[in-house]
Amino acid sequence: MSTEHRTGDAPESGDRGLYASVVSWMENLSETQYAYLLLTPAFLLLGAIAFWPLLSTFRLSMFADSFGQASVGNFIGLGNYVAIITGERSALLPSPFLPEALTTRAFFNSALAVTVIFTVISVFFETIIGFVQALVLDQEFRGRRWVRVAIILPWAIPIVVQGMIFYLMFQPNIGFLVGTSDNPAFLNQLGLLSTTPLANAQDATMIAIVADVWKTTAFMALLILAGMQSIDRGLYDVAKVAGASAWQRFKYVTFPIILPTVMVAMLFRTIQAMRVYGLIETVSGCTTVPSLSCLVVTTFNNRMLGSSATIAFITAAIIAVAVSVYIVGYVRGGQ
Amino acid sequence: MARVQLENVSKHYDDVTAVNDMNLDIRHGEFICLVGPSGCGKSTTMEMVAGLTKPSEGTVRIGERDVTNLPPKDRGISMVFQNIALFPHMDVYENISFGLRLRDYEKEEIDRRVDDAAEVVELGGMLDRMPDEMSGGQRQRVAIARAIVRDPDVFLMDEPLANLDAKLRVHMRTQLQRLHRELDTTIIYVTHNQAEAMTMSDRIAVLDTGELQQIAPPLVCYNEPANLFVATFIGSPSMNTIPGSVTDTGFSSAYGDVHVEFDPTAVGVTPGQEVTLGVRPEDVYSSDLRDEVAHSTQAVSTRSDVLEPMGDEIFVYLVTEDVDLGGSMEEGSDPGEILMSVGPDSDITEGQDVDVVLDRSKLHLFDENGDAIAHGLVETPGAGAAGEAEAEGDD
Amino acid sequence: MARVQLENVSKHYDDVTAVNDMNLDIRHGEFICLVGPSGCGKSTTMEMVAGLTKPSEGTVRIGERDVTNLPPKDRGISMVFQNIALFPHMDVYENISFGLRLRDYEKEEIDRRVDDAAEVVELGGMLDRMPDEMSGGQRQRVAIARAIVRDPDVFLMDEPLANLDAKLRVHMRTQLQRLHRELDTTIIYVTHNQAEAMTMSDRIAVLDTGELQQIAPPLVCYNEPANLFVATFIGSPSMNTIPGSVTDTGFSSAYGDVHVEFDPTAVGVTPGQEVTLGVRPEDVYSSDLRDEVAHSTQAVSTRSDVLEPMGDEIFVYLVTEDVDLGGSMEEGSDPGEILMSVGPDSDITEGQDVDVVLDRSKLHLFDENGDAIAHGLVETPGAGAAGEAEAEGDD
Amino acid sequence: MSDGSTRSDGGVQSDRHEPELTRGPFQRWVQKSIKDPKRVYRAMFYVATLFFLVTTLFPFYFLLVLAVTPDTGSLAVLPQLSTLEFGVFLDVFDRINFLRYMLNSVVLALSTTAIVLFLASLAGYVFGRLEFPGRQPLMLLILAISYFPPAAFFVPLYQLFTGNVVNGLSLYNTPGAMILPFSSLFMPLSIFILTTFYGQIPDGLEDAARVEGTTRLGALFRVIVPLSAPGVATAGVLTFIAVYNEFFFSQLMNNGQPENWAPIVGGLLSLQRAGQFEVTYGVMAAGSIIAVIPVAILVVVAQEKIVSGLTSGALKE
Amino acid sequence: SGGGDGDGSGDGGGDGGSTDTPIGTSTSDEEVTIQIAADSNFSNAADEISQTLHEDGGLPDNISIEFLAGSFTTGDRRSQYQQILSAGQGRPTVMMMDNGWTIPFIARGQIANLSQALPSSITDSVMNDYLENMVATAQGPNGDLFGIPLFADFPTIQYRKDLMREAGYSDSDFDTWATEPMTWQEFSQVVRETMDATDTQTGFTWQGSAYEGLACCDFIEFMGSHGGSYFGEFENYFGPIGDRPVTVDQENVINAVRMMRTFIYGQDDDDALEGYADISPDAVVQYTEEPSREPFTNGDVVAHRNWPYSININGAEDAFGEDLGVMPIPYAVSQEDSPYESIGGSTSALGGWHLTLNPNANDARKQAAVQLFRALQNDEVRLRMFEIGGWTPPIADLINTERTQQLEIIGRYVDSLQVAGENALPRPVTPVWPQQSDQIASEVNNALRQEKGSSEAMADLQASLESIESQA
Ligand SMILES: Nc1ncnc2c1ncn2[C@@H]1O[C@H](COP(=O)(O)OP(=O)(O)OP(=O)(O)O)[C@@H](O)[C@H]1O
Ligand SMILES: Nc1ncnc2c1ncn2[C@@H]1O[C@H](COP(=O)(O)OP(=O)(O)OP(=O)(O)O)[C@@H](O)[C@H]1O
Ligand SMILES: [Mg+2]
Ligand SMILES: [Mg+2]
């Protein structure tokens, strides 16, 4: 028994006793039991609000679409999956799942290809720019707080508004960025944009990417910045004395230490980018840039519940594949 | 009551066994020093007592209670960590008072205690500093204050004074001893400082590669080391170890001509057996002083190689034979080399021929496995010297 | 060439002056130990040499070059940090090779050097461990290896051996000395270990509260301390300081009756002046041994208070007078208390009356400000003892 | 700083005595830069900062121009001040109860952030610092939630919240109907962020806390969370803003009325159109500026406070 | 538990027997509030509307009306209703539904059958007096009525009289054009001439973006005015799915596409249709209503096709005022020359909204709703609604009256509106219309962007529409 005593020891009330016994019960759990105990609240919530709906949606994905009275048709097992992947259902979708030919046009018309293009390019640029932004914010300088506000601002913008900004910016005769064929704007002259970029799958995808980079780079920057701020400054002293230049300190100390954070940021950005919907819908419309989530939402709105659920699960499966790239990289990096 | 017992405790990491089948029984109120080479498992042992590391096997008891599965907070311990581990986000006051605040002490009581503890570690005016604004020694003292501000049953201190200068160290040492007396606690203390281990502890536990080598009062460890490891580990500079073999009439060294005469059967060795002779530097005398040594061996002729003046004494490295002396300065126990300590007024110079004698009452004999065979090789074997040592150790 | 010069260097923090107007001139190839109490500014000084901290005032030169504004990487230094600071994300190999990899050494060269360095710090088999899988001492050794694997002009080592056991410490010490010889570098070394400072350094720089007190060879610091601070700081246990005043015939203590006879004018003091007498524990002898002391004082009658057996010697705390002895054990320099060190065979017991004499050739006299007046109070004033000490210090 | 240091250097001193005629300011700058590369870093730093400011703020500028340009006027890069109508910012409040929408959003975002940070702290601690069987699979399971488009959750959740699954449990048009899905959908991100941050805190500090007498949970909230302040604050900010902007459930889990806890998105959408086809970009732009700028500033200030609060004073009692 | 069958059961709730039995029309004195899911224009004008309903329409005083301001984005509203109805929620009582998607709700049996629920006095007057095509979008397969048309919307062409005058046209021309549709050929020449005469960059803006608006409206007009149709005769428009011809590969349809392309690219276009001028900017391929209106309002365009809301903007004094002219949509093939009976000639897309009844509402509210519907039959109420919010009555005779002519701005153009209303053609709404409209929008837009040839695009569209027809 401990000899420690509380001064002015309050008489132990029943509550206190209960509390104490709960605490001691918790303290005596094995590491595994304790781990599961702490995870319980999160999993209860996730179970009810995430896993259960997913299961029920999965069930839905096994039913045919219905265009009549009922909300879903017959049970057809994995029929929806087959139909969508083979392209059998393409006619009922705003755009096919896989490219139907090996042309650029077909690629930009395929939900999968567009999504992958969007994801790879936007996550790439977000990471790089986010890194540089974080490096800038990690410096001490006057007005840092305001620069930080400026960098966060895009991220605080609701998607509707973000979409509106970019939609209008690239609207001929309205925004500043697009001209007409007689009176081309700067970007048109450079040949970077057609005069009707939002109707053009390629241009519209790029605009969506720019819009996404503009908005979500802050996400990267904030996370990376947090990672940088948690690094023990003493390590930089060691590195300096060992002869590391600023770049080498970054390369050997900062970068590897924040790598896990960067990976998490990239991982989630990739996942989010692969689910892009609102941005595309508001900037160019899902018909022009058909992302995977566009298909999910469009089919859902069109009451093709089975197809919608199926595409949702296919999307998730594709994301899972993308994620496994990170996980493999992470495991490799961790060794 | 804070008896601390480790029963067959082991700790295995993936590829290392940090602690192996350790048995320790520490009485209430005892002051135990854990010593041993770097990486021998001292910190791991402490962590198991504290409850921070779960033993792979075995039982830990504190005050007769099995605490193996009890969390640290319920073990009635406080600890000074080897790596100091101050909370970087708290100032000194908050660091020191952390444990008290957790226990809902009253504000005045906390303030009083923190002030006291800060006084003890001489950090009076620094209560509102942050850890990163302090020097290494100051941080360590905060860590000590954090531990002593509470009054637990057992103090665990892992090299609490490593970063302090000699003077402050002595000061802190006496403060800790006073605390020990006043609070009537059990203290387990890791130190690399021989003086600390010798002066502070009731018993010293010597560890090597995770195994307990000897646990005994300091002078017993010093005078009657259980094995070669303890013999060379305790005492600085280290004991001279002279490999050799038993002859019909005593011991004869493998290098140089160190001969000690004794009756092998009385000691319990057989002629021809490979043994190691141990002698501490301070038991090596210049043969001029032979008369002062009650039981001296016959003279050994050596040459002084290197002199290390230490202020209050001089270490003289003696070569008994022209063997390879490549790394000779490294350790006193190189075969063929003997380290002698002499007073600061000695007139020995480097490269001079020196004849030395050993004090036979202070010689140690170890078998092939390094286990001690005898301490003191005077004609009447062993007993006298051992008794003497014990008497000293008890006070 | 790696001469290191600090010219009027100061470092002020918000409310503390960590280093105050420091002037240091360290010759190329010198081995300097920085010593001083905790928080006196040793680490800060090192950091300013390294370029990690910018001096508030003053100039730092390395090899005649003004490096005050140069980044650490261009200063040709390597450093062992007091807080160890291993890179947590690199294994031992990567930690050690960090500096080499920065400089694009070839793989084989790196491997060779890392193996060598690991060998020196005895971490051979641990190259692929992560820092958090190592013991405190092992980590510290990695930090040392990381510093020595390169060949800079100046080594800065901030308590590199604090977490090592005595034996390993001795080993590391000799390794560092060898390295120093081989690489022909300048080493600035912070240590709290007297033995280290004494044995390793060419000169010791003693700091107190940010100010340089003395910089001199170890034995000069030991035998001729510039002031009371250095006198009590160097040497463990600490020098006895006996406050008193100058009489017509010499010195008379304020407590107890310690009297030393000398000619005040020869020494340069005036009768009635308040002075402090300093004597090291090993220069206090039981009056039985009076004959062995060439210049002994008259006997002082004392009573033994506490005995501290250290293995190779015993510390005896002597009380000269029944003054308040509350915290007497704390420091040897309490007025009215004298610490004596005797051999392990001494038969003094606690509470016994002991008459002691002091070795007058080893006495020190300090004025009111603590500055040294004289070292050695034999009739022929000062010169002899000082000359002796210098001779010893030079080798 | 760099200026001062170069001046104390003799070399630069002599530069200043050279005739200035032959050298333009730029050459002088280059000359100095060669001597002191820090100047170059500094310059790079300013260029980068400026670049980011321009690129991030340009669309805002566009938004502002959009807001203050009258409906009948055309947009111009540099609009004439006289033609602008700043009254649009007041319109936002005249047309709808915009404040209430903002308040709803803030309440929803704060509650969600609190729930998420609490639950994710527990989970992040478990995943970041404990070893137990099932760790990897459970993490993947949590991550997998983020794989799904929000639509995949919608139908069952809507049924649930409208009382069609559990009788009598009707959360539609209440904050719960949004906070619950927000919490579970945004939680995986926070769990992952906190897992990495908590995992990096040295064991020694947790050990020290436990020896000092905290429970395991106590060590988490008193030491690990404050020490990970930058990470926790960032997770909080990310969650807060994500909720503030959430589009999908915000719209579908209430009927768009401010009294029914419709958040800002609902407000913006009701500002968006004057009719089925006519879009009043101006008011909507004004609305979003009003909605966003205070929040962004609040978030930055709060984040700084959180970080400094958690790392220093938070544990003062 | 009930998780899995959530979707099914929700609908079941909707079907609930209540729709079969007439709702009592007796008035009780209890205070009842009914909620109408509408948009913020209604909720902003709630007081006035409520006033006219009570005072002119005789709505009992114990019934109060609350308008919910839903999103103006029609798709959002659709999904919102879908959730509400499939969850079996009782509120709101009455929903304002786009005539573009009322039929799928009818098909799924999610809204109350008014033919059975309302007294026949009300339903009969709807069937007889209201715009026939409008009513058709609220009818079930067997002709039962499921929604009461609330207001209608028909696009017209707006043009700049001031510019035209410079080009030599006079007010008498304008007067003729206001009620007598001209041909597309003539139109394009008039516009071209005006452009040249006034050095105006842009002649005619309309909506060519790949969105619902193209499929439902712009293209229906261009195609219809060429005598083309998606599914042949008008009677096929609402089904039966899979059992009707798909007719987008017909020449009339292709010609419509070619004409649109010619407007954009002039005679240089591969597919150019002779006799038409280059009057539209490239940008029309990404224009929706507002982006196409902005340049017109800003004064850079001669003519513009849009819904009546924009007449109010462009006809305002600070815009063009009296200089704004309005005409019905031009045509290329008259109704007589068209292959289909009721298609051809000037064609305006028919937009507009119905009021439908939530079958899950409680009886008191349903009864109150009946009173509401009854009140709405009152002409005075309809006219007041036109005055209050510009909600065009879905009754041809009420559009152009002396009262309506007094209305500010729009009053000047009610004659053209009436013509447009009489020629209004709804989109072919069925449960598969969303899919089909996606395909139509995307293929037509492809053609407009010269990604595909006109006939190629229409052939592709033909194939995918047929495929949808067969799969559904
Ligand atoms: N960042 C800082 N802010 C304020 N004071 C500081 C800071 N760093 C050091 N100090 C103070 O400066 C003085 C010198 O510190 P320094 O680290 O040099 O001491 P030291 O001699 O190395 O001590 P130790 O032996 O304990 O490591 C100390 O009193 C310390 O508290
Ligand atoms: N987490 C771990 N994983 C693997 N090995 C470990 C771990 N922790 C400690 N060890 C190993 O266990 C052994 C004992 O470590 P411990 O820290 O107890 O040593 P120590 O006696 O305290 O040493 P020191 O005096 O150097 O602090 C060491 O060899 C160490 O490398
Ligand atoms: Mg240790
Ligand atoms: Mg220090």
Image (spheres, coloured by chain):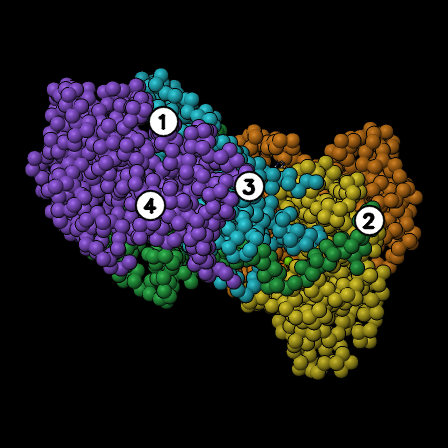
Chain colours: A green, B yellow, C orange, D cyan, E purple
Question: In the figure, B137 relative to D102: above or below?
Answer: below
Distance, label 2 to label 1, CA atoms, is 78 Å
Q: What residue does disc 3 label? A: D110
Question: In the figure, C202 relative to E422: above or below?
Answer: below
Where disc 3 sits, the SS reads helix
* Residues marked 4 and 3, same chain: no
Q: What residue does disc 4 label? A: E138
Q: Nearer the viewer, mark 4 or mark 2?
A: 4
Q: Nearer the viewer, residue C134 or E157?
A: E157
Q: What residue does disc 2 label? A: A9
Q: In percent of the image, x 82 and y 53: which residue is there? A: B183
Image location of residue A283, percent across then percent down: 32, 40
Q: Nearer the viewer, residue B260 or E189?
A: E189
User: Does the image show residue B251?
Assistant: yes
Distance, label 3 to label 1, CA atoms, is 45 Å
Q: Nearer the viewer, residue C135 or C48?
A: C135
Image location of residue C334, percent across then percent down: 83, 42
Where disc 1 sits, the SS reads helix
Q: What residue does disc 1 label? A: E387
Q: Give amino acid for label 1.
A: Glu
Is ligand 3 closer than 8 angstroms to the Cβ of mark 2?
A: no
